[in-house]
Amino acid sequence: MLPAGWFYPTPCDATRNCVLEHLLSPLRVVKLVEDMLGSHMHLKRAESIAYAVIGAMHAGRWSIAEIGRAMARARGTSPKHGIKQIDRLLSNEDFDL
């Protein structure tokens, strides 16, 4: 069962999958990851992980560049900065997969 307030449909047109779009919105994923990792991890690192998750969900392939580009598309930012953020996250010695 989903937590209270997790799912509220949003109005949209027939060309988009609104339910999936709402459930996987960047802000919702960030909130979920911060809730799960916030007390064990620096908040900005938890946020970076959340954005990496968003990029991985939207990427066609799982490469650093493709995940960074997908993350940037989902957030509406520059692909260059998305790739850089994913690269720095995965290069961080304190981040253990």
Image (spheres, rainbow, N blue to C red):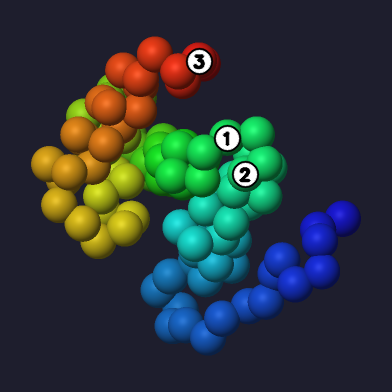
- Front label number (3 vs 2): 2
- Front label number (1 vs 3): 1
Give the Cα separation between the discs numbered 1 and 3: 12 Å
> Which residue occupies the foreground of this view, 21 or 4?
4
The residue singled out by tag 3 in the image is 96
Element assignment for label 3: loop
Q: Residue at x 71, y 66 (%)?
A: 6
Q: Which residue is drawn at 21% across and 57% down?
A: 77
Query: In the image, residue 80 lies at what x, y percent?
Result: 12, 41
Query: In the image, residue 90 lies at what x, y percent?
Result: 35, 21
Q: What residue type is labelled 3?
A: Asp
Q: In which quarter of the image is the N terminus?
A: bottom right
Element assignment for label 1: loop
Give the Cα separation between the discs numbered 2 and 1: 5 Å
Q: What residue type is labelled 1?
A: Met
In the picture, measured across the screen, residue 73 lies left or right of residue 25, that is left
The residue singled out by tag 2 in the image is 38
Q: How crowded is mark 1: few (under 14 residues within 10 Å), some or many (20 or more)?
A: few
In the picture, measured across the screen, residue 20 lies left or right of residue 74, that is right
> Which residue occupies the foreground of this view, 51 or 24?
51
Give the Cα separation between the discs numbered 3 and 2: 16 Å
Q: Which residue is drawn at 81% across and 61% down?
A: 3
Q: What residue type is labelled 2?
A: Gly
The label number, if any, that marks residue 41 in the structure image = 1
Look at the numbered discs 2 and 1 and tell me whether their residues touch, using CB distance below 8 Å: yes
